[in-house]
Amino acid sequence: MGTRTAAWRRALWRRPEWWTLGLSGLAWTALVARELRPHAAHHGNGLLASWLHWELMIVAMMLPFVADAVRLTAQKSLWPRRDRAIAGFLVGYLGPWTAAGLAVSAALALSGSPASPLAAAAGFALAAVWQLVPTRRRAARGCRLTMPLAPRGWRADRDCVRYGWRIGVACLTSCWALMLACALSGHHLLAMALCAAIGAADRFQRRADQRLLSATAGAAAGVCFAAALLVG
Amino acid sequence: MAITYDLTGPDKDRLNSWHWLHFPGADDAHLYTLTGVVRVEFRGTSGDDWRREEITLILPFPEGAVPDGQVLQVDYFTPSVHLSSVFNDNQAVNAGWAVNAFSGPGRPQIRSSLTVRVQAAVRDAEGVVFSLGFDVAVAGRFVDAPEEVHVRVRRDVWKLPEWDPVLLWYARAIAEMKTRPLDDPTSWRYQAAIHDYVRAADPLRSDSDSLPSATEQSRFWAQCQHFSWFFLPWHRIYLGYFEQIVSQTIQQLGGPSDWALPYWNYSDDGNPSQARRLPPAFRAAQTPDGEDNPLRVDDRRAAANAGQVIAQDLHVDLSCLLEPTFGGAAAGPAGFGGPAVRNHNIPGPVGALERTPHGDMHVRVGGWMSRFNTAALDPIFWLHHANIDRQWTVWKKRRPGQHVDPTGAGWLSEPFDFHNASGAIRTLTSAEVADSEASPFAYRYEDESDPLPAEEGPGALESLTMSRPPSDEPVPEMVGATEAPIRLGRQGASARVPLSAPRGPGLEALAAPTPPRIHLNIENIRGSHTTPYRVYVNVPEGDAPEDHPELLAGSLPMFGLHEASGGDPEHAPSGLTYAFDVTAIARRLGEAWNPNELRVTFVRDAFDDEEERAALEAPEPPPIEVGRVSVYQSR
């Protein structure tokens, strides 16, 4: 190592979560592309299609929220296995969300009715209530959890997956209602953008104004309800 | 160490070849150049070790230059300072030197003098006495002199007589504040609850309490910032408003208007027999007024109230002042002020100052002071935190330009809500209190000098260089960690950390001229009972750790253990993570440092014999669990 390392390389050292955010970007691109493609095959309401759409939404919306946990997982791992550690974390993290997605998709498929503005209104109203429940706030502190990670072998993989899982459970408990509202809106881009904004305001501020966030979700419920009246 | 030469007064004989020039410019601007040579008492040492000194020069400004009632508001300031003559018994010798010169904080206003701070370092120059040449250019405009701001001076409590008026008035004010209702922001208990409050565990709880509304409690109570880089600014604001409230109470009682909170300097090497005892005014049963003494709290360790020495060297250690950066990393090195937290991200290890001496002294006083939710009920809390706040100023002053506060909006603009002495709500940010004299609280400390000897520093040569841009900051790489958790009981514990060679950023250390920096992280420490430990590294097999003070990495105070382990609704139950810089130990061991394995030994930090006996007779508390021990290497 004669010469000083290139600046871009050092920047990547500092940001091992770069490819996680890249995945999120790709997922957003796929979601936007789906919306823009007119009447494509994806409008099938099968369980699988619905569940895939949910997974895409989670990867797009939720991965930026765990960028710091991903970074920490890499920094607390031995250098050669840092990307494997991140992969383990992501597998664990997506676990609870995947399970929730299956449940939501099954419910939607069974009910037979596609997403609608009225359903979205109900979803946002539920999110507005959930935002203020103390259980949610207590669970949300788990989003900033750290855990010891074994340095090598299968235990290291196990611990990374376990860590991702625990963050995933905290995340799910905190944000399930907002994600449900998105699903009930048919993964409408505006709904997803709004939920991402509410989630970000909650996660990335030391003292988020819960009443304001709840009111925002409530306002969204009102807008959806008005849309439902206009349509129906 | 620091020396000041006041060339406007007592030291003016040291000034030679002094002359100045004045250049009036456009738009009422004025440029002055000041040139001269100062004879300083700065003796070099022989050999390769750098000897550093911080020299403050108070230079005279040309007499009559500044009109009456006005000051020169400096817009532009270029100091150039150099070591000019070097003499050793009239024989010139070669000396390596480096000089950085900085003015005081902010944009200075000059009436009759200008302060220049110089960091000088020499080596290979035994016995010589130096001269400093300076060439300073100052440009600015004349403005009306501002109103005098009265600056409070916080005094060293051990330099005051037992019942100095400062302490007597403090006691009287507390007695008065205790009569105010719980929901009055200027009451004693409300002020304490701002730190933390658990109703069920409130020792002064009574059914007749009038609690503030839930909204008010959630906004103003239990707000103490711990385990993050907001620790220092939040506590500065907390103490600032507390001081104002106490001062106003004192004035209402007929006392002086310039009361300032004293500080407790337990690290004072100049007063070793007394500094580590609780000052007598905090132990006496009664005040000179014949009243029950509000400064005394029974719920402390018996040794504290008996006036015994309650701390050892490692508890009052000030190596936190050597930390090069304010904000700590997420893993590896701790910062001076605590882990950087941007956008409420997951924090790293507890900051160096917050760990020692802050956490240690909370636990050494014991009782209320050892728990978050009762600590501020003990009047000594405020003097303890005044001393911690003072270290912030000391840290910045000892390396101006290098030891700097964070510059990002994430730290600077973070707002904190409090009540002022009139009960009105006030919001302040970290930026507004970064300089205590310029802050709304307008105070300074009696002694803000550097307590560490000049040679100190894990990389004395390194710290002479200018601070690096963020893109060039070293990136720590983990080179080893334990596989399984470690239980710490009465007997302590030990563990082996297998180390591998660095494969990434840690390799930069091998190409650097200075030895690699090695940091130890004791991660995810969880438990319910605050039992402090010490940690040693690489104690030889079979040896008692106590026989190797040179291998002591530091103290694990465990202050806040319960809150960090799930006992606090604001904190994730991650437990505490502490960081230790073991670079100096590694360098001292030299060949004996094993690059393949590091051994860590935890020893329970016993209190005095009597407490030990009582502790051993009591049932053993549940063990504290250390999640992992890890080792980081960086440039």
Image (cartoon, rainbow, N blue to C red):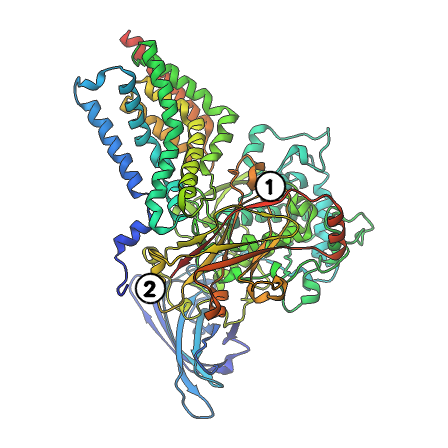
Amino acid type for the residue under numbered disc 1 = His
- CA distance separating discs 1 and 2: 60 Å
Q: Is residue B273 above or below residue A35?
A: below
Residue pictured at 46% horizontal, 45% vertical: B347
Which residue is situated farthest in the right direction here? B290
Dot 1, how many residues are within 10 Å of its Cα: few (below 14), some (14-19), or many (20+)? Answer: many
- Residue B389 appears in which quarter of the rendering? bottom right
Q: Nearer the viewer, residue B538 or A223?
A: B538
Q: Is residue A121 visible?
A: yes
The secondary structure type at the circle numbered 2 is strand
Residue B101 x/y as whole percent = 41, 70
Amino acid type for the residue under numbered disc 2 = Ala
Residue B562: which disc?
Answer: 1
Residue tagged 2: B29
Q: Nearer the viewer, residue B444 or B577?
A: B577
Q: Nearer the viewer, residue B207 or B110?
A: B207
Q: Earlier in the sequence, mark 1 or mark 2?
A: 2
Residue A187 x/y as whole percent = 29, 21
Label 2 resides on the chain identified as B
Label 1 resides on the chain identified as B
Disc number lying in front (1 or 2): 1
Residue B285 x/y as whole percent = 80, 51
Q: Is residue A54 above or below residue B390?
A: above
